[in-house]
Amino acid sequence: CWCMLEAYSRAWAEIDYDAIAHNCDEVQKIVGSTKIMGIVKANAYGHGDIACAKALRDWGVDFFGVSSVDEAIGLRQGGIEENILILGYTPEEHFHYLHEYNLVQSLCSYAYAKKLNQYGKENHCVIRAHCKVDTGMNRTGVIYQTQEKHMEEILAEYQLEAVSVEGIFSHFPVSDDLGEDAKTFTKKQIDLFNEVLANLKAAGINPGVTHLQNSYGILNYGSLGYDYCRPGLLYMGVTSDDTIPIASNPDFIPILSLYANVSVVKWLQPGMTVSYGRHFTVKKPCKVATMSIGYADGLPRIVSNQDLHVLVHGQACPIIGNVCMDQCMIDVTDVENVQEGDTVCIVGLQGGKRVTIDEISRKAHTINNETLSALAARVPRLKKRG
Ligand SMILES: *Cc1c(COP(=O)(O)O)cnc(C)c1O
């Protein structure tokens, strides 16, 4: 397993899988009796999907969410036997995997549900599914919004003979925003979802398991009483952006740290420049270290020359000049005894100081979801011990 490598590389991530249990406890305090569906799509946002799923399972998670059928098969082959919901689209030529691997497919539309039903009838099998209701994201699902309500399609999905609808869910586009407009919109989505559940019950249909909240839906809307919630980020111990205010006060442990090595240390004199494009000019004698991580590892090139700090011997040092594909340079003038082979902390704790993924994301004008999931496959994920 790639997350169990013993030898450290030129750049590596260390993942504290044990902290997942703590982070799940924190989520559970917020959502009350609602169970956690562990969202492990995109290799658990770069943290290793099988290792995360096993840690979540050991804590008590019995349902996982992924984006595609190949991610789901990867989990099955990795020994995950619990329920797996595919949140995204499965093309028709892969329908047979749904049955073979006992997966739950989300119904992207009523037309899609009919296609799945056709497949099930022709192949004498029943496909497990969750009904996706589109209450305002306008991505996938049957539309059920103020202006346009397709209850008849939702009802029809539950009547299909070769598709077994075992659950129902919807998704929030602005649960991270505590502004009045966004809160009104999100609350309306909750009302619409509840209306759908009431309509199903009135028609004598059991909706199956219900789930609505993503990470910010959990943080800002607390206990809503549905069967499951769907955190991705939260069990990883981070949010999208640590400057976004939230309505709860959880105590998360970020599970990912990122490191590289110092390869060269040298003194540069005024007028000399650093890296491609010569965008950094030395002003006074400056001790510069080269470190072995670059944009092909997932350190975004856009953070070049933005005063992003990393830790060497527990001291903050800025990245100077352009980030290269496999390397970049840092100003270590104020750090004593820096040597080739020293460990640089790009994300995590060193000498009592912390540098966060949030700082990288902010300077890259994006959110942690993207920065984490863009961490390259070539960066080994090591399991943090002790
Ligand atoms: C990705 C995703 C989630 C998890 O999102 P987080 O913000 O990481 O909690 C939940 N539900 C759906 C439908 C998703 O696509």
Image: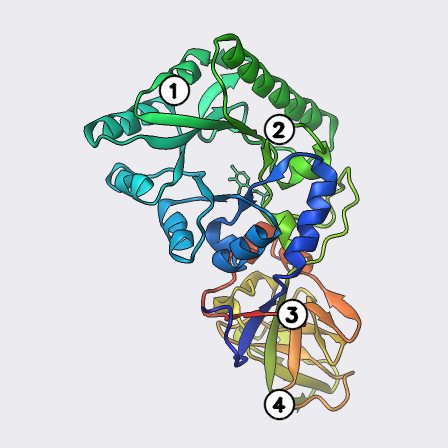
In this view, the residue in front, 374 or 274, is 374
- Identify the amino acid type marked 4: Glu
Find residue 223 and report its image quarter: top right
Residue underneath mark 2: 226
Query: Which residue is at a point 71% across and 57% down the rendered structure image?
Result: 253
Counting residues from the start of the chain, the first of labels 3 and 4 encountered is 4
Pointer 1 with pointer 2, Cβ within 8 A: no
> Which mark is on residue 340?
4
Residue 25 is left or right of residue 327, and the answer is right
Quarter of the image that includes the C terminus? bottom right
* Closer to the eye: label 4 or 1: 1
Residue 147 visible within the image: no
Counting residues from the start of the chain, the first of labels 2 and 3 encountered is 2
Counting residues from the start of the chain, the first of labels 2 and 4 encountered is 2
Counting residues from the start of the chain, the first of labels 4 and 1 encountered is 1
Residue 188 pos. (x, y %) = 64, 19
Counting residues from the start of the chain, the first of labels 1 and 3 encountered is 1
Residue underneath mark 3: 346
State yes or no: Cβ of the residue under disc 4 lies below 8 Å from any atom of ligand 1. Answer: no
Residue 263 is left or right of residue 164, and the answer is right
How crowded pointer 3 is (Cα within 10 Å; few <14, some 14-19, many 20+) is rated as: many
Residue 131 pos. (x, y %) = 45, 26
Residue 135 pos. (x, y %) = 54, 23
Find residue 280 and report its image quarter: bottom right
